[in-house]
Amino acid sequence: KAGVTQTPRYLIKTRGQQVTLSCSPISGHRSVSWYQQTPGQGLQFLFEYFSETQRNKGNFPGRFSGRQFSNSRSEMNVSTLELGDSALYLCASSLLGGAGELFFGEGSRLTVL
Amino acid sequence: ELKVEQNPLFLSMQEGKNYTIYCNYSTTSDRLYWYRQDPGKSLESLFVLLSNGAVKQEGRLMASLDTKARLSTLHITAAVHDLSATYFCAVDGFTYGGSQGNLIFGKGTKLSVKP
């Protein structure tokens, strides 16, 4: 059974640009969550999607957005990148959504110069 | 504010020794999760503890949950080098602020097992 797949794995952007990250959940999982991991702040919740609807959102500015498609694949977008957006972005999927055991992808490491 | 606190944050131990990592949380959640992260890698689910008094063991790791004390422990028995990693505990944010739910993670405990 394939795990959670995230693309791209690594990317470098400059301030002011935007970036789109993609996540394919485990087959059959309808919930996709996104987390940001930084050395200073640790793991912080961005948002959760279930059946194409955003059900929960963390405390991040509006520059961070996401969406989910009918096949449960999800994308997150960060516009007007700032240096502080450099982080590992982790996508996780779960069967039923909400809080529960999450299965994480390998992450997308974003560096903003 | 919902908090999840782990201690210690750094742990250096010798092979063969025992040690315990502690996870305190402030929510009323009765579900707790332990994850492992190797450097540059993703998070791997280790244990899911679903009720008060739950105890789970896998190899040299044993996790327990005391919901009344809002405390979970991850006990390491006879540590080996392969256990070197960062360990995170997490709790449901479900009951906090009435949200649909997400996980609130501790800062992580970086474990280094030396021969």
Image: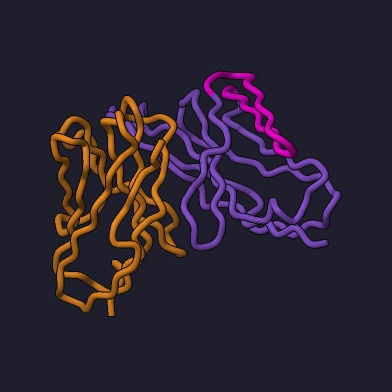
Q: Nearest the camera: A45 or B38?
A: B38
Q: In the figure, is residue B54 to the left or right of A25? A: right
Residue B68 lies in quadrant: top right
Magenta residues (range)? B50-68
Q: Colour of chain A?
A: orange
Q: Residue drawn 69% across and 51% down?
A: B83
Residue B38 lies in quadrant: bottom right
Q: Nearest the camera: B36 or B99?
A: B36
Q: Is residue B99 visible?
A: no
* Image coords of residue A10 (percent x, y): 34, 67
Q: Is residue B78 above or below residue A11?
A: above
* Image coords of residue A53 (percent x, y): 15, 34
Instruction: Describe the colour scheme in one phrase.
Output: by chain
Q: Which chain is purple?
A: B
Q: Residue drawn 28% across and 33% down?
A: A31
Q: Is residue A7 above or below residue A55?
A: below
Q: In the figure, is residue A22 to the left or right of B6? A: left
Residue A9 lies in quadrant: bottom left
Q: In the figure, is residue B78 to the left or right of A29? A: right
Q: Is residue B23 visible?
A: yes
* Image coords of residue B86 (percent x, y): 59, 54
* Image coords of residue A41 (percent x, y): 42, 59
Residue B54 is a magenta residue: yes
